[in-house]
Image (spheres, grey):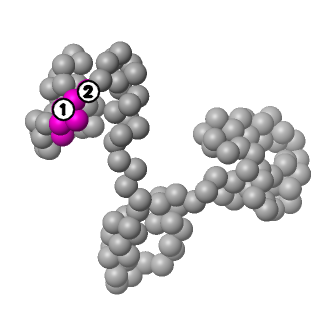
Amino acid sequence: MGDLFLEGSFANMRALEEKFGLARGNDFRYLQVRDFVRRQVPSFPRLPPRGIQDRVISRGEVGEGRVSDIYKELMGAEDTGTEELKLKWEEELGGEMEDGLCADALSRVNPTATCARLSLIQFKVSIGLI
């Protein structure tokens, strides 16, 4: 998606036509793409800051040590924690959650669940949301 931005801002149709050699007359498609990016990027029309996924994907080299590099990048990523999520849930539930409740509920979730949705359902059941 970064290719759609020039000098930190979302490129206009004419600039993209020149950059990629696109044929004229794709204005409607440009507007569709622009609208999609606007909905997905909170900082639109400015280029969003590079996230961990951007740093991992942008490393084009393949070969020995690649998995180790990706591992180091992921392990060095900032842990956002769960406090913000907990506050949001407390707001939705209209009350406070005990500090150990989330940790206890997470320990009850089956780590071999077949999908994230099943894990979420197990978590909600264990804290009494369902």
Q: Which mark is residue 86?
A: none
Q: Position of residue 62 (x, y in %)?
A: 43, 78
Q: Nearer the viewer, residue 8 or 79?
A: 79
Quadrant of residue 127 within the rendered picture: top left
Q: Which mark is residue 101?
A: 1
Provide the major secondary structure of the magenta segment.
helix
Amino acid at pointer 1: Leu
Q: Nearer the viewer, residue 13 or 113?
A: 113
Quadrant of residue 121 within the rendered picture: top left
Quadrant of residue 64 within the rendered picture: bottom left
Q: CB under 8 Å between callouts 1 and 2?
A: yes
What secondary structure is marked by label 2?
A: loop
Residue pictured at 77% horizontal, 50% vertical: 10
Amino acid at pointer 2: Met
Would you say 119 lies left or right of 9 here?
left
Q: Quadrant of the C terminus?
A: top left
Residue pictured at 24% horizontal, 18% vertical: 129
Q: Position of residue 52 (x, y in %)?
A: 47, 60
The residue carrying mark 2 is: 97
Would you say 91 lies left or right of 61 here?
left
Q: Which residues are magenta?
A: 97-103
Q: Position of residue 9 (x, y in %)?
A: 78, 53
Q: Position of residue 72 (x, y in %)?
A: 35, 72
- State yes or no: residue 101 in magenta: yes
Would you say 40 lies left or right of 98 here?
right
Q: Report the residue that reaches farthest toward the bottom.
A: 64
- State yes or no: residue 67 in magenta: no
Q: Let me know if residue 105 appears in the view.
A: yes
